[in-house]
Image (cartoon, helix red, strand yellow):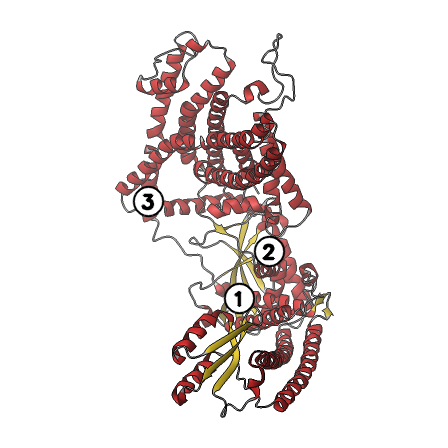
Amino acid sequence: MFRSQEMSYFQLVMPQDSAWTIMDQLGYLSKVEIIDHNPNEALINRPFANYVKRCDDLIVKIENMLQVAKNSNLLSNYKRGNLKQFTKQQNSHTHTYLDKIEEDINKKTSSFQEQNKHLEQLIDQSEYIQNYIEILLESQKYLGDNVFQNQSISKFEAYVGILKNQEQLQFHRVIFRVTKGNSFVHLKRMNEKQSIFIILFPNIGNYGKSKIVKIVEQMSQGKFSLPQSQLEFEKKINELKIKQAEYINLIQMTQNQLCKCISNMMVIRNGLPLIEYYKFYLIKEKELYKELNKLKMQGRLFLGELWVPTRDIQSLEQTLQLIKEQQLNNPGGQLAQRSPPDQLQKPTYFRLNEFTSIFQEIVNTYGIPRYQEINPAIITIITFPFLFGVMFGDIGHGFVLFMFGCYLCLFKNRQFYRLRYLILLMGLFSFYSGLIYNDYLSISLNLFKTCLRSQEQCVYPFGIDPMWGGHLEFNDSFKMKLSIIIAFFHMLLGIVLSGLNYLFLEDWLRLFCKFIPQLLFLVCTIGYMVFLIVYKWLTNFEPKNAPSIITTMISMILNLGRISGPQMWEGDSQDYIQYCLLLITIISIPWMWFPTIISHFLLKKSRQQNEGKRKTHRIDYGQLIEEPGIEMSQTFSYSHDQINVKQNEHIAEIQDQTVQLQSKDISHEGIQDIIVHETIETLEFVLGVLSNTASYLRLWALSLAHSQLSEVFFELLLVQPINHGQPISLMIGFLFWALITFGVLMCMDSMECFLHSLRLHWVEFQNKFFKGDGVQFNVYSFRDRIKETVNLEQQ
């Protein structure tokens, strides 16, 4: 994980009859990346676009079927499939199995959709009948015997129906305006969505009546009429109840049919529910045909390029050889190792596990490491939670965060499960920093005997003496200087890593003209300040004669090394040392600026001279394609001894690729542009050392803010009720103290410390050695694709 895996470039030629089998096994192998032959070509224009669309349509049908069944509570016994069980069955089918699955899914989903559509119609009819019965009963209750009078004889007319609850006010206003207030509207709420309305109005003529009829037809959910006699009323009620009972039976029968359809899809096949097996298989087929679209078709051959980790070459060869042995009637594929084209950048690939993946994701969010560049994630595993702990340092809060991390490790939580190891380490380092600060929920713990008033000379064994824990001035000075020390060593680590990169790539010019002057500049400025801090801590000064570190650093620059004020030690050696450090600092600036310009100028000139001589190493398919009629069964293999011989060429390839990346960084036409670019980079580093050091003071600021907030909450909500002897106020205050501590300190402040720690790594640390312009190794893996798809659906 310190550096990315060594990658090898291969060319693969497959006959059409064996292409599906080879690509299927490569997907299960999960070791290669297929390079897109024509990335600018639209998906719809590719040869297997129709197969991809077929798989998408079938997946959508399965998902719709599952969603309908879930809404109907038909998935009580549904269990998701086991991906490991599916990947074990990699040799059980051929490419024609997709047609069988498509036919089976279309048959079962069409039957399911018909039954579901019929069920919806039955439910609508049953609801209509139930609403009709309730309307009749409510009309009889509200209108009395008038409901059975012939409306041609009666002086009043009535209309009934069902109305949405949110349309009640609008309906009431419209009826009032049409009848000019000569009407009465009765509304009764049936449920959360619907209400019964009854309109009673006098004879207002055909024109007014037609308007009311249109309003009722438009806003009523169904058409309902009132019977004209008591006999008709009883007859209507009986008919509706009989129909309702019939519809209930039909609904039950249809639901049983739906359950039967779902049960047929839940049959265990190959250790998985059939619907899950189909779903996994379709995702696999979709990924396979997407990768086939990346290959170039030439006659009845598929021609492709792929990346594979060097250590997995043997597994790739064994897979191809196994396919050849299993399919004696079909020719195998040809595999040949080649040098990658100049314009093709090698991908970056790290072998990760559940612990390291979250830290690698933190780095990848900023940028992908270059090929064989030092991976910042290996350092981030310790430095990220450590810097968080410096800002969040508290014994109590750190312990709570640590226990939450332990809970996530023991019990899977969908929201925070991937962060479990990060949260665990953040809590551990916060607890450790709290012990150093001797801060437990704003209380200083006297774990060991204090040495402040001891008659014997002693040193407090661990952390800060409790007698100094409550002194704001002491904590302020200590945490500020501690943040400067951390800043120096963190940036120093970044510069050392850049030197290791140059040493690995054998880039001697950048090693001597970038790494060494940058290291000297940092050590002679911030390093000297750190030395003064530590020296002042270890030396007993009288308060009146104590030297000021800030004054010493300012006078060192303004007075050319001479000191104005109290010295750190006696004699003139401090002036001489500071003068030498200042001289080295000044010399290091043109040192890291001028030689690089000369190098870029010579590199540009050499590149222009050799531009016409450079050959392009694209695929020479003529070397791979055999004459017609000859069986393509040869597979080029490489033994470990041959691979070890090729290791000697690996560093040279990395150097060539580094030169290409550098030429991308400096894509200028004239020497003037190169000078401007290098001047900006030099000034960025010089000013960045100072600004980055100041940026690390956020460690001091957030740590101080965390402790002071904790102290304020404790003093206001707990100490005052205790001092005044108010138990009820203490109980209420404890409740508020717990809620505020959780909301402000455990949630808001922890997120703030997390973001500031992220900033310190991305900007202050990684810019010393990390470019972040690499290319991710996109492995061709059925397992990874299925996991990604299932996780997205669960979210």
Q: Is residue 632 visible?
A: no
Which of the two residues, 644 or 379, is positioned nearer the viewer here?
379
Residue 116 position within the rendered picture, expressed as x and y whole percent measured from the top left? 62, 78
Identify the secondary structure beneath mark 2. loop
Residue 144, relative to residue 702: is it above or below?
A: below
Label 1 neighbour load within 10 Å: few <14, some 14-19, many 20+? some
Residue 772 position within the rendered picture, expressed as x and y whole percent measured from the top left? 45, 45
Identify the secondary structure beneath mark 3. helix
Which of the two residues, 9 or 267, is positioned nearer the viewer here?
267
Residue 193, relative to residue 507: is it above or below?
A: below
Q: Picture quarter containing residue 528? A: top left
Q: Amino acid at mark 1?
A: Lys
Residue position marked by numbered label 1 in the rendering: 290
Q: Nearer the viewer, mark 1 or mark 3?
A: 1
Q: Nearer the viewer, mark 1 or mark 2?
A: 1
Residue position marked by numbered label 3 in the rendering: 604
Residue 675 position within the rendered picture, expressed as x and y whole percent measured from the top left? 29, 38
